């Protein structure tokens, strides 16, 4: 009688505290992990082979740059001669000056922001019909013309250029006639002027043949993609949606032209099934680049599947059930734990269902069996991966048979602390594993024609949340990232996190 009275008093106390002990299982949370999109500024260097520019200019510039044909030119000026008996003046000896200037194969290179196009020149100049005295005198000369090209990109991303040409003669073109040196560099200077003008007129068109705008447009469209950050446990995806493209100049290294581009993109993280790729938008007008590029921001949820916590809790309970529990008002009670069920419930809490049977050692109450439902709040400090469970309390029961002893056992002193301690875990290992997977996934990755090279440098963790998807720890990561068009020879193999 005394035992039953104590049980009734305890039940009334429990009802006054929670008012829920007669309810069923807590509702399952349906919420999913929501991630605020992050803004990243990805470096997007594009390379072009300057040999292509040399080839296009090679086709644009004719082999013979100009011809010379000047009849009745004074080749030998008159001289006064003292013959002793008289002084005479020799006549002016005239001739016809003919010749041509041709070019050789162009080569290209450069450094910094200067493209240097080298164009070898060869001049052949002849003096013909030299006053009937000499039939022909011939002179040759060689020079190297240098075209200094500077580039810019218009608002439509098409390249524009300005070209300046100078040259150095290895041997100034001239002829020696009757001991007189006649040079022709002034004529060469005048003839080079229209060559420069022609190159400047044709340079924009030739630059467009390099396909710079097409490469930029291809890189822009290819950047609308979804990358796998973690293939399983859990699947994590990063969706990249470009918003703007900035131009910050170019650099020449040898025969490689590299455009410095920065792409602003929204990076969204999804946990679960792969989301659809974003729809590409047209290439926006050029905007000047300001500040640094190559920064990527990611959200990386470290998720613990509730099912992984169940065997951990059961192991602790089975070990503890080897000795009786002390229940106030009842005395020693033996329990046999059969099953643990854990899931997320409303209010950012976790529901814990324990199916077990309990029987007092004295045999005054009898055996009770059923499922007791508890709720708990996962707690951690910012930038800490150590998880504690607080506010653990009974929320209801199901399948109760034989009495209320299991409720009394769950509310015994120290029981909630024991269960909370059994549930407590450290996310450090999961955290480290996920970061390792993500680092490998994005360190050098091919996605279509796009190659991504990224490195995680800084991370911070937030506070825990029990959601319908699992118990997760939000992690924000920052690092550097470069995306570029992959060369066709690099292959199409994709590397996934494992």
Image (cartoon, rainbow, N blue to C red):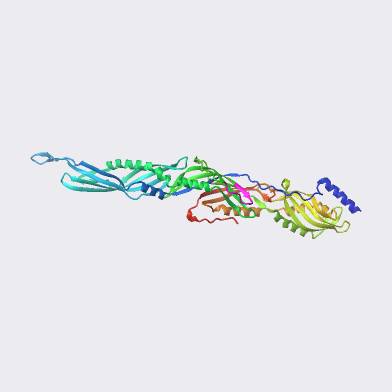
What residue appears at the point 51 percent right and 44 percent down from the top-left corner?
A: 262
What residue appears at the point 87 percent right and 49 percent down from the top-left corner?
A: 9
Please provide percent x and percent y for residue 46: 48, 48
Q: Residue furthest left?
A: 85
| Rendered view: 422 above or below 175 | below
Please provide percent x and percent y for residue 142: 29, 48
Please provide percent x and percent y for residue 345: 73, 48
Q: Residue furthest bottom?
A: 322
* Residue placed most toward the observer, 247 or 401: 401
For the question of whether residue 254 can be seen, the reply is: no
For the question of whether residue 313 can be seen, the reply is: yes
Going by the image, does 166 lie left or right of 260? left
| Rendered view: 2 above or below 84 | below
Dividing the image into 4 quarters, which one contains the C terminus? Answer: bottom right
Magenta stretch contains residue 273: yes
Labels in figure, total: 0
Going by the image, does 312 lie left or right of 498? right
* Residue placed most toward the observer, 421 or 272: 272
Task: Give the main secondary structure, helix, strand or loop, of the magenta stretch.
Answer: loop
* Residue placed most toward the observer, 472 or 390: 472
Going by the image, does 262 lie left or right of 318? left
Q: Residue furthest right?
A: 1
Magenta stretch contains residue 199: no
- Looking at the rendering, the stretch of residues picked out in magenta corresponds to 268-278
Please provide percent x and percent y for residue 276: 59, 49
* Residue placed most toward the observer, 250 or 29: 29
């Amino acid at each position: 009688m005394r035992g039953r009275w104590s049980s009734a008093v305890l039940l009334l106390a429990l009802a006054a505290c929670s008012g829920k002990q007669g309810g069923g299982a807590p509702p399952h949370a349906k919420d999913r992990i929501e991630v605020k999109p992050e803004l990243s500024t990805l470096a997007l260097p594009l390379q072009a082979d300057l040999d292509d520019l040399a080839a296009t200019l090679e086709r644009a510039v004719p082999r013979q740059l100009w011809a010379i044909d000047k009849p009745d030119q004074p080749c030998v000026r008159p001289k006064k001669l003292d013959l002793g008996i008289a002084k005479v003046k020799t006549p002016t000896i005239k001739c016809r000056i003919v010749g041509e200037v041709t070019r050789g194969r162009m080569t290209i290179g450069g450094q910094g922001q200067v493209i240097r196009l080298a164009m070898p020149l060869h001049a052949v100049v002849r003096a013909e019909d030299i006053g009937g005295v000499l039939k022909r005198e011939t002179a040759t000369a060689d020079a190297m013309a240098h075209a200094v090209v500077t580039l810019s990109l218009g608002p439509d991303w098409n390249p524009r250029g300005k070209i300046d040409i100078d040259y150095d003669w290895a041997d100034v073109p001239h002829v020696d006639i009757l001991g007189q040196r006649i040079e022709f560099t002034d004529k060469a200077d005048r003839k080079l002027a229209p060559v420069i003008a022609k190159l400047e007129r044709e340079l924009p068109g030739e630059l467009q043949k390099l396909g710079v705008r097409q490469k930029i447009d291809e890189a822009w469209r290819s950047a609308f993609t979804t990358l796998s950050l973690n293939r399983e446990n859990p699947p994590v995806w990063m969706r990249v949606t470009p918003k703007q493209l900035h131009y910050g100049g170019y650099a020449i290294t040898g025969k490689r032209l590299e455009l410095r581009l920065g792409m602003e993109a929204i990076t969204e993280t999804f946990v679960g099934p792969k989301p659809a790729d974003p729809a590409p938008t047209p290439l926006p007008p050029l905007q000047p680049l300001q500040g640094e590029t190559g920064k990527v921001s990611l959200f990386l949820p470290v998720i613990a599947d509730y099912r992984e916590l169940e065997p951990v809790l059961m192991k602790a309970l089975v070990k503890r059930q080897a000795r009786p529990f002390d229940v106030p008002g009842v005395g020693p009670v033996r329990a046999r734990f059969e099953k643990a069920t854990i899931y997320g419930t409303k209010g950012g809490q976790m529901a814990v269902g324990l199916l077990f049977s309990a029987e007092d050692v004295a045999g005054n109450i009898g055996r009770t069996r059923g499922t007791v439902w508890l709720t708990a709040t996962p707690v951690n400090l910012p930038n800490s991966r150590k998880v504690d469970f607080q506010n653990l309390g009974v929320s209801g029961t199901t399948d109760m048979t034989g009495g209320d002893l299991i409720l009394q056992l769950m509310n015994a002193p120290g029981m909630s602390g024991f269960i909370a301690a059994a549930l407590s875990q450290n996310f450090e290992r999961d955290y480290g594993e996920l970061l390792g997977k993500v680092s490998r996934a994005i360190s050098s990755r091919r996605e279509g024609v796009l190659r991504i090279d990224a490195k995680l440098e800084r991370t911070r963790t937030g506070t825990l949340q029990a959601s319908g998807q699992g118990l997760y720890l939000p992690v924000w990561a920052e690092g550097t990232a470069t995306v570029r068009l992959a060369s066709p020879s690099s292959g199409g193999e994709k590397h996934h996190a494992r």
